[in-house]
Amino acid sequence: MTTPDELERRHTLTTATQRYDALRMRDALAAMDPDNEPTLSPTETLEMLALSEVIIRKAGYGRQAMIRSARGAGASWSQIGNALGTTKQAAWESHQRWAEDQV
């Protein structure tokens, strides 16, 4: 079975998203016309699940990098919270938890 850790080493955010989208499209087409499109195998379905975790992880890393860049550029926590659609407190706490988990 393919794990998110294994896939994370093999894929960038772009390639993980492309593979996920290809599998998702095949799955959607099979659901619309099961006579013409083969459904995903159990292995492919599990790969799709693992890829979704990889995408979440990689997007999260990018989010934190952008928060650090915004702070470095002089953005306030209120501005960052607004950009994230949340409060300044929630943005700060989320970033602090992430930073603590990296240690």
Image: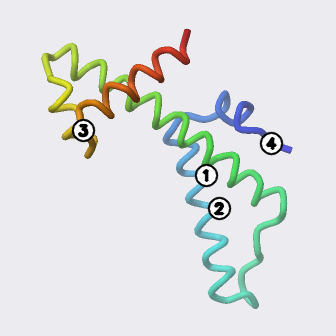
Residue 35, quarter of picture = bottom right
Q: Which residue is mark 2?
A: 23
Q: Which residue is mark 1?
A: 19
Residue at image location 26% in from the left, 46% down from the top: 85
Q: Which residue is mark 3?
A: 87
Question: What amino acid is labelled 4 in the image?
Answer: Thr
Q: Is residue 73 left or right of residue 12?
A: left
| Image quarter hosting the C terminus | top right
From the top left corner, tell me how far across and down residue 65 is, in percent. 37, 23
SS at badge 4: loop
Residue at image location 67% in from the left, 32% down from the top: 10
Q: CA distance from mark 3 to mark 2?
A: 36 Å
SS at badge 1: helix
Mark 1 closeness class: few <14, some 14–19, many ≥20 residues within 10 Å: some
Q: Give the number of the mark in front: 4 or 1.
A: 4
Q: Give the number of the mark in front: 1 or 3.
A: 3
Please give the count of numbered marks on the rendered protein.
4
Q: CA distance from mark 4 to mark 1?
A: 14 Å
- Say if 5 sits above or below 70 in the image: below
Q: Nearer the viewer, residue 28 or 83?
A: 83
Sequence-first tag of 4 and 2: 4
Sequence-first tag of 3 and 4: 4
Label for residue 2?
4
Q: Are the residues at dot 1 and dot 3 in contact (C-beta closer than 8 Å)?
A: no
From the top left corner, tell me how far across and down residue 84 is, in percent. 28, 41
Q: Nearer the viewer, residue 49 or 88?
A: 88
Question: What amino acid is labelled 1 in the image?
Answer: Arg
